[in-house]
Amino acid sequence: MTGSILVVGIGPGDTTHMTPAAQEAITGADLIVGYKTYLKLIAHLVSDTPRESSGMRQEVDRVARVIALAQTGKRVALISGGDAGVYGLAGLVYTMLRADPESPAVDVEVIPGISALNAAAALLGAPLMTDFAAISLSDQLVPREDIMHRLERATEADFVLCLYNPKSRQRTEPFELACAVMLRHRAPDTPVGIVRAAYRERQQVTLTTLAALPDAAIDMVTLVIVGNSETFIHDERMVTPRGYANKYDLGAKHAGPRD
Amino acid sequence: MTGSILVVGIGPGDTTHMTPAAQEAITGADLIVGYKTYLKLIAHLVSDTPRESSGMRQEVDRVARVIALAQTGKRVALISGGDAGVYGLAGLVYTMLRADPESPAVDVEVIPGISALNAAAALLGAPLMTDFAAISLSDQLVPREDIMHRLERATEADFVLCLYNPKSRQRTEPFELACAVMLRHRAPDTPVGIVRAAYRERQQVTLTTLAALPDAAIDMVTLVIVGNSETFIHDERMVTPRGYANKYDLGAKHAGPRD
């Protein structure tokens, strides 16, 4: 029997924001593999299913192990926080299978999840009503200059910015550089939303400005959303209107056309 | 009693990719309002709950109606396809409440959903392992020049591109312009994934190239993902490796550091 790998995005962490497809993939698996924090978040869904955890910096080992297990005919769930398809492990699974074409075939399916940007946006208000860019500030696998170049272009072009992996205890410099890049092209009072541990026990939602962002409390379980030139804060919500929407006569009976 | 508006992202459409939080918001509502296609997709979840549909181009009317109903004390679910927080109606709700500060207060909560980019990425393989930009090609509310400017900057900076609302029957020109812009800065053989009606009955997943994109079958229920300079297609999956990941010795016991 051909084994299979289900690459499962568990969403922000609580079961209410985990899709039924993700829950079924987890409960139906022969074995569940993932970083230990994520295994804790799904522990209540399964009782007897064997689980294997690995550390945060051992992705290649973890995926190699998952592939080897699937090749014995098992149905293995590889779980990721958020969406496994957004900065998750789905790419490494495919890349490693491609690198070893002689090994036994396995089926791979990605189960999408609520990514950090979806969760953060919902908690902040409605910052993503218009074009946005997702940028990871981790320079472990991508050259820092490439990150800053992308960030600068996206800032100039007035994208709303979703910053993944903004800062870790050891890695603070890219975040400082990023703040400087954004401040060169965007007003200091640009609204910024900071969401830590979305939909988990220690959730923190903070509204601030681009000028104050360098001093904000930020870590690896934080997503930062930087507004564009039209983003406003009203009644403690961060909102980016959709283009001309703010120019509508909102009391009028009929809106302009849209498709 | 203060009424409430739950702005609910129902995901791609099938219940297996709709979060329990979204399903609870729908089943617990006094009234459900939405575009008729979305109401059909959730009809099996509710039996007696009153539902009100409106056409695709009547967002302002629909949201005004939802606010008026919530102000009578009702709990109203306003449903959107995908994620209500990504090009959805959440922004219009907040914008209209802000425009009328004298009217009775209502509570607003956004329930995040699987957006089109999450669904399409999962079905295509793993195209979003690195930085990406979401761009809507609809020029009904945003000037066409702004869209093309953003697209050009994002293309130059090697973002993976997620194109929302790529084309409608009446609106074909922005798509043609967009293809020309992308072809100026990216190789003709760049992999492109086209996902129509993700996770619905008539789902279509197509892999093609940037050169062939102008002639592809595209409509309003389609999401287009254009790869970056590193995206590859292998075994019918579209994959963007994460930065240096493709330079790893993937057979080695230990991966490089990551945080």
Image: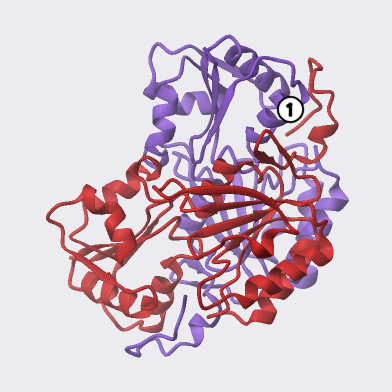
Chain colours: A purple, B red
Q: Is residue B99 left or right of residue A220?
A: left
Amino acid identity at mark 1: Arg
In this rendering, the answer to whether A99 lies above or below A252 is above
Going 58% across and 78% down the picture, which residue do you hit?
B139
Q: Is residue A166 left or right of residue A33?
A: right
Front residue of A91/A154: it is A91
Residue A197, percent across and down?
Answer: 52, 42
Residue B179, percent across and down?
Answer: 71, 67
Q: Chain of mark 1?
A: A
Residue B103, percent across and down?
Answer: 28, 81
Residue A256 seen by the camera: yes
The residue indicated by pointer 1 is A98
In the image, farthest residue toward the left: B48
Residue B152 position by quadrant: bottom right
Going 69% across and 48% down the picture, which residue do you hit?
A166
Q: Is residue B208 left or right of residue B40?
A: right
In this rendering, the answer to whether A187 lies above or below B81 is below
